[in-house]
Image (cartoon, helix red, strand yellow):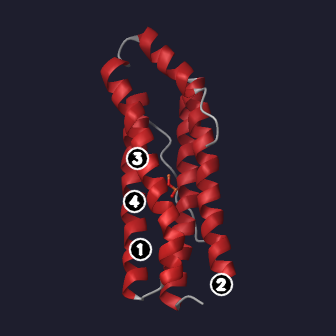
Amino acid sequence: MISTAMTKALNIQATREYFAAWLYRSMGLWCDEAGLHGAATWMKTQAGEEIEHAERFITYIEDQGGHVEIGALEKPLRKFASLDDVFAKALEHERKVTKWINELYTLALEEKDVATQIMLNWYITEQIEEEQQTQEVLTRLELYGKAPCQLMRIDHELGKRKED
Ligand code: OFO
């Protein structure tokens, strides 16, 4: 059993995870149009992961006997200046997600809700990985991505991404 406040907060985060899927899917569409099909694959894989993140929250709310309600999704960004810009915005978004997960954890601590703390541990670890992998791509793009042949090489590498 989880509190009403916690149920509401987890529902909001589930919706945010769906929004993240929308955002990454939209970024992937931009990449495809820019001829960056490897990056598009990377983004599509990430969108799939975000749906899994949302589903994980939903399953937890249900397992705790809570009421699940998905909120409305805002329109994701569709225009970007460059692939650097796409990954810079992805990193910015992941940092926001980390902050939200930390806020959920703080609420769970305040409520002495140990089960939710344990559930959130997975997301805390996941956010370290998500920020790190996005930052890594952005760094490579900033360092080498200005040369078209290097950009193509990076794009090719991004296309090898498999679901973790
Ligand atoms: Fe990209 O993060 Fe979900 O949780």
Q: Which residue is mark 3?
A: 131
Residue 71: quarter of image = bottom right
Q: CA distance from mark 4 to mark 2?
A: 24 Å
Q: CA distance from mark 1 to mark 4?
A: 11 Å
Mark 2 residue element: loop
> Which badge, 1 or 3, is on the more N-terminal residue?
1
> Which badge, 3 or 2, is on the more N-terminal residue?
2
> Which badge, 1 or 2, is on the more N-terminal residue?
2
Q: Are marks 3 and 4 in contact (CB under 8 Å)?
A: yes
Mark 4 residue element: helix
- Up-down relation of residue 158 to residue 44 (above or below): above
Q: Which residue is mark 2?
A: 67
Asked whether 148 or 129 is in front, the reply is 129
Q: Which residue is mark 1?
A: 105
Q: Which residue is mark 4?
A: 98
- Cβ of mark 2 under 8 A from ligand 1: no
- Cβ of mark 3 under 8 A from ligand 1: no
Q: CA distance from mark 3 to mark 4?
A: 9 Å
Q: CA distance from mark 1 to mark 2?
A: 20 Å
